[in-house]
Image: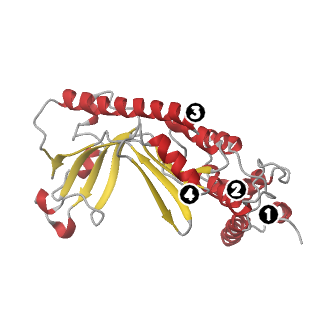
Amino acid sequence: RASPAARLLALQAAMSRNHATGASSARSKSVVKLVACLVFVVGLVTEQPLGFWPGSAPRPRSVAVAAFGASAPSIADINLDLAKQALIPAEESSNAAWASYKRLLLNRTLVFDKSPKGGVDERVVDILKELNGHEEYVTASSCSGRVCIMAYASKDGAEAPWEALPSASNAKRRLKVSHDGIEDAGAFFNLDDVPLCEYCQPGDHLWLKAEPFELDIDCASESAARRLLAVATPVFNRGAVIMSADAQWRVTVYGNQRLEMPLAFSGELVYGGCLEALAKIINGKLAKNWALMDRFLGALQRGL
């Protein structure tokens, strides 16, 4: 039976022959892309290495990307470096199921990153590297902290702000996302410029949000989860919790430097204070957030 890498090579050769004979129509291209997607999914389900894992076939990942053509997944170099440096138990180890799970999760979250940003935040790279460098841990999601303006559409056309409080049921969009703070308060909060001006109609409400560091880590065992929790708790006093679902242990870590407040209702600015001062408050919270991340990294390096 041909390996996934061999099947992908055969698929790529077939694509080249179709192109050479001029038989590639719009319909055939769609079919080829669909087949390539199916091959990629089969590769993940069957837990085949993607090329940079020890003992894998020569460069099958690059073949998979080539098979997608112009629609290949966008892969950030920083994500690939993290995946390459992750430590995964050997297939013949006593915990082969965990090894397969860690490999698949890293493939999904790093190699084929489908997040809007397309790559992890630079400030969280060292933390991810430290955790994934231990066989018993794998990072599932992360954010180094950010500031953004959220646009909410009132439910059922309600214009009163108390009838359109932020919730999961409200249509929403994240605007002006920054992981580095606010450099120019006047430009950041300007309701006359794109994109904020597009969300200043009756029933559209803008909220300012500063979100802290967040990290989800899956663990190979209960003991590994409790060891990680013991390291995280002194840094994030009330922001480290342990969960277990379907025999999978997870530790969630989150900071406390957050802010959420209304900014504009139906195009009218409701914050009457100094915008420069507001920007400095946001930047100060993010700076404290990053300082906690540095402490957490040090604790991981000493305690794991």
Instruction: Measuring from the top left, give residue 46's x and y in whole percent.
Output: 74, 67
Q: Find residue 289 and report its image quarter.
A: top left
Q: Residues within 10 Å of mark 2 (few under 14, many from 20)?
A: some
Q: Which mark is residue 222?
A: 4
Q: Quadrant of the N terminus?
A: bottom right
The reply to whether the C-beta atoms of the residues labelled 2 and 1 are less than 8 Å apart is: yes
Q: Earlier in the sequence, mark 3 or mark 2?
A: 2
Judging by the rendered image, the residue that carries numbered circle 1 is: 15
Secondary structure beneath label 2: helix
Q: Quadrant of the C terminus?
A: top right
Label 2, label 4: how far apart the Cα atoms are: 43 Å
Instruction: Measuring from the top left, give residue 145's x and y in whole percent.
Output: 40, 40
Q: Earlier in the sequence, mark 2 or mark 1?
A: 1
Residue lying at 46% horizontally and 31% vertically, measured from the top left: 295
Residue lying at 76% horizontally and 56% vertically, measured from the top left: 49
Q: Find residue 161 and report its image quarter.
A: bottom left
Q: Earlier in the sequence, mark 4 or mark 1?
A: 1
Q: Is residue 163 left or right of residue 182?
A: left
Which of 9 and 40 lies nearest the eye of the viewer? Answer: 40
Label 3, label 1: how far apart the Cα atoms are: 48 Å
Q: Residues within 10 Å of mark 1 (few under 14, many from 20)?
A: some
Q: Is residue 76 left or right of residue 51?
A: left
Judging by the rendered image, the residue that carries numbered circle 3 is: 301
Residue type of the residue flagged with mark 1: Met
Instruction: Measuring from the top left, give residue 195's x and y in whole percent.
Output: 31, 45
